[in-house]
């Protein structure tokens, strides 16, 4: 979707953290991405490499951790885990599901020197 | 030279003489007497406390295998946190005014601008302002201004969505009145605008009958994020063989709570329903502000 904008958001946060924690370089960065966040991971990895040039995270390795997609089923009332946004409810087979998380896009932590 | 701290030479820890790199790898606390200054980086190491090397005393308060412990910085920050903070500020401005903001989202060509012009015409003298988002041109803002409404055009250039900062700047340029509507016409795109909070009260998705009944299934995120779906151009449905009930079923499939309004900006069908919805939400917001 807007992986370039996301990479720019990441860069801003890194630059802010570099000032706050006085580090020169990020070696490794871990992101948490929900299954329903609509993030194309390959596109984000590509945008990350491009956008981080000239920043403390230039050349840093990027790790993306998947967070499960959860949804509330409007027929059986259960909160269930879904692998895919349009999967039916694993409990009752209904298709009426409202996502309850899984749209996270977070920087979890980073290893800095 | 040690790749962790940049020191050369060795350090003595008890009876052991180790290189800096070895000391870092073993997580042993050691001195850093060397010539460079420490303004660009720090030199924390696992704390040796009462004979125990504690990996939870660094800045992060935790340890992750494979990571140089005391240099792990936990952030737990949303990638869009800056956008969300600006959106929150926009929302506070609107709340203070008791103004109701609608973020209109759709694919290009769904009839957003025509629908907006008709909405403005039906609202008559009610105070309202418009923010028009497009990659290029001021065509849409020109069409809105022709109705007599105040409008600001935001050109995103290469950008595929409006963000909260763009809206904040546009709001500064508009005469936002107490109890008014702010219509934000987002860039025509059913993907990216779903993720960017602008500070609006509701996202309203517009879907025209010529786009195919399965659009909500193809782009579920946008229809999940929307409070209302306006199924537009219903006057064309007979010519396109569109199954309006199927569109509605697909919308509820991805968002069981979505409100669906069928309308045609051209013939005026359904416009009353839409205007009633708008005025109802504004009245609620004004009441909340008064209460």
Image (tube, helix red, strand yellow):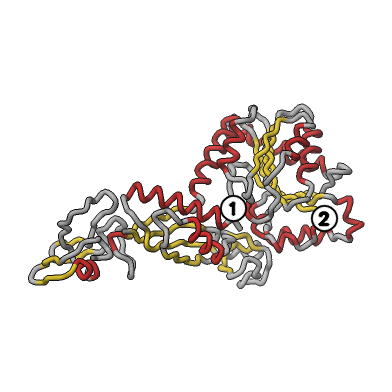
Image quadrant holding the C terminus of chain A, namely bottom left
Mark 2 neighbour density, 10 Å: few (under 14) some (14–19) many (20 or more): many
* Residue B118 visible within the image: yes
**Foreground pick, A50 / A28:** A50
Q: Earlier in the sequence, mark 2 or mark 1?
A: 1
Mark number for residue B258? Answer: none
Dot 1 falls on which chain?
B
User: Percent x, y for residue B189?
Assistant: 69, 53
Residue at figure coordinates x 57%, y 67% from the top left: A80
SS label for mark 2:
helix
Q: CA distance from mark 2 to mark 1?
A: 25 Å
Q: Is residue A69 visible?
A: no
| Residue positioned 53% across, 46% down in the render | B83
What is the x, y in percent for residue B142?
A: 76, 35
Q: Quadrant of the N terminus of chain A?
A: bottom right
Q: Is residue B265 left or right of residue B61?
A: right
Residue B61: image location, x then y, percent: 30, 58
Viewer-proximal residue among B128 and B243 = B128
User: Could you classify mark 1 by the number of other residues whose Cα lies within 10 Å: few (under 14), some (14-19), or many (20 or more)?
Assistant: some
Foreground: B95 or B195?
A: B195
Q: Which residue is mark 2?
A: B209
The verdict on a common chain for dots 2 and 1 is: yes
Residue B195 bears which disc, if any? 1
Asked if disc 2 and disc 1 are in contact, CB closer than 8 Å, the reply is no
User: Which residue appears at 43% of the width and 54% of the height?
Assistant: A54
Q: Secondary structure at mark 1?
A: helix
Q: How many marks?
A: 2
């Amino acid at each position: 979707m807007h992986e370039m904008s996301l990479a720019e958001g990441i860069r801003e946060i890194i630059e802010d953290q570099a000032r706050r924690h006085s580090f020169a370089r990020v070696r490794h960065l871990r992101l948490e991405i929900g299954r329903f966040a609509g993030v194309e991971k390959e596109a984000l990895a590509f945008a990350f490499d491009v956008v981080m040039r000239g920043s403390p995270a230039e050349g840093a390795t990027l790790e993306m951790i998947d967070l499960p997609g959860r949804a509330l089923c409007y027929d059986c009332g259960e909160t269930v885990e879904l692998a895919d946004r349009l999967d039916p409810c694993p409990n009752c087979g209904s298709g009426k599901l409202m996502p309850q998380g899984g749209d996270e896009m977070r920087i979890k932590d980073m290893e800095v020197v | 030279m040690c790749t962790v701290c940049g020191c050369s030479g060795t350090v003595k820890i008890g009876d052991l003489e180790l290189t800096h790199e070895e000391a870092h790898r073993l997580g042993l606390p050691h001195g850093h007497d060397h010539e460079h200054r420490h303004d660009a980086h720090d030199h924390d190491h696992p704390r040796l406390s009462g004979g125990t090397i504690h990996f939870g005393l660094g800045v992060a308060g935790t340890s992750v295998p494979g990571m140089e412990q005391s240099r792990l910085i936990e952030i737990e920050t949303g990638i869009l946190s800056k956008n969300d903070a600006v959106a929150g500020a926009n929302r506070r401005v609107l709340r203070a005014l008791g103004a109701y903001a609608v973020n209109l989202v759709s694919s290009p060509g769904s009839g957003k601008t025509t629908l907006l012009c008709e909405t403005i015409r039906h609202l008559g003298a009610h105070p309202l302002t418009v923010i028009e988002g497009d990659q290029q041109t001021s065509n849409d803002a020109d069409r809105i201004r022709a109705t007599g409404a105040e409008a600001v055009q935001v050109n995103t250039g290469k950008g595929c969505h409006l963000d909260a900062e763009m809206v904040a700047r546009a709001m500064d340029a508009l005469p936002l009145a107490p109890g008014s509507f702010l219509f934000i016409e987002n860039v025509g795109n059913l993907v990216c605008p779903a993720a960017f909070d602008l500070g609006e009260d509701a996202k309203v998705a517009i879907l025209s009958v010529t786009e195919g009944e399965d659009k909500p299934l193809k782009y579920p995120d946008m229809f999940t994020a929307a409070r209302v779906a306006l199924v537009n151009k219903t006057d064309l449905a007979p010519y396109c063989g569109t199954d309006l009930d199927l569109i509605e079923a697909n919308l509820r499939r991805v968002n069981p709570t979505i409100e669906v309004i069928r309308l045609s900006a051209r013939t005026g069908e359904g416009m009353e329903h839409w205007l009633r919805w708008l005025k109802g939400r504004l009245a609620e917001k004004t009441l909340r502000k008064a209460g």
